[in-house]
Image: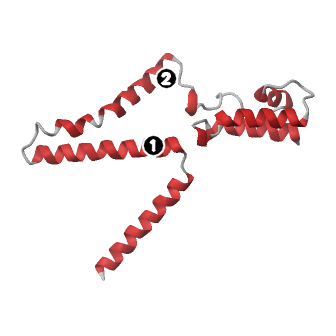
Amino acid sequence: MLWLILGAVVLFVLMGGARAFERASVTTIKSFLAWVAALGGIVLALLLILTGRGGIALGPLVMFGPLLYRKWQESRAKAIGGGGGASARPPPNRPGAMTRKEAYEVLGLHPGASEADIRDAHRRLMRGAHPDAGGSDWLASRVNQARDILLG
């Protein structure tokens, strides 16, 4: 009976994980898998050290290096003032709805653009801004919001 309950719990966890992966972006999944690999390397190194094979433990610890390097580069870019890219966030003092003028600026169009021009600009911008293509959720939502405002 215990094994049946344990199996049900494992199945429940796996199904929940599948749902989370279904909704996650590609970059989130890549980051998650990198952390799983790094934590696995740390656990393996710990086990090797505890069994008296400390010299061999350096190999699994090397797996953690690329993650530390990436985090160091991200923190350095934020300190310098870069920090844009896929993690772009809205400016802090921009509350409220987007105006028509802002919508034209977001899509890179001039006032009075045709419906076809608006749709073409939206499609062009979404190729790079879509979260599934490695873009930003915030930028994609701004592009969608601009299209919705201009097309009514």
Badge 2 is on which residue? 78
Q: Nearer the viewer, mark 1 or mark 2?
A: 1
Q: Residue 59, image x and y in percent?
A: 20, 37
Question: Looking at the image, is 15 positioned above or below residue 76?
Answer: below
Q: Residue 151, image x and y in percent?
A: 87, 40
Rendered-image quadrant of the C terminus: top right
Question: Looking at the image, is 37 positioned above or below residue 19?
Answer: above
- Left or right of 62 in this view: 21: right
Badge 1 is on which residue? 30
Instruction: Name the amino acid type tagged 2.
Output: Lys
Point out the tag, 1 or 2, that comes first from the N-terminus.
1
Give the Cα separation between the discs numbered 1 and 2. Answer: 21 Å
Question: Looking at the image, is 97 positioned above or below residue 77?
Answer: below
Rendered-image quadrant of the N terminus: bottom left
Q: Is residue 22 visible?
A: yes
Q: Residue 20, image x and y in percent?
A: 51, 56
Residue at 83% of width from left, 26% of height from top?
109
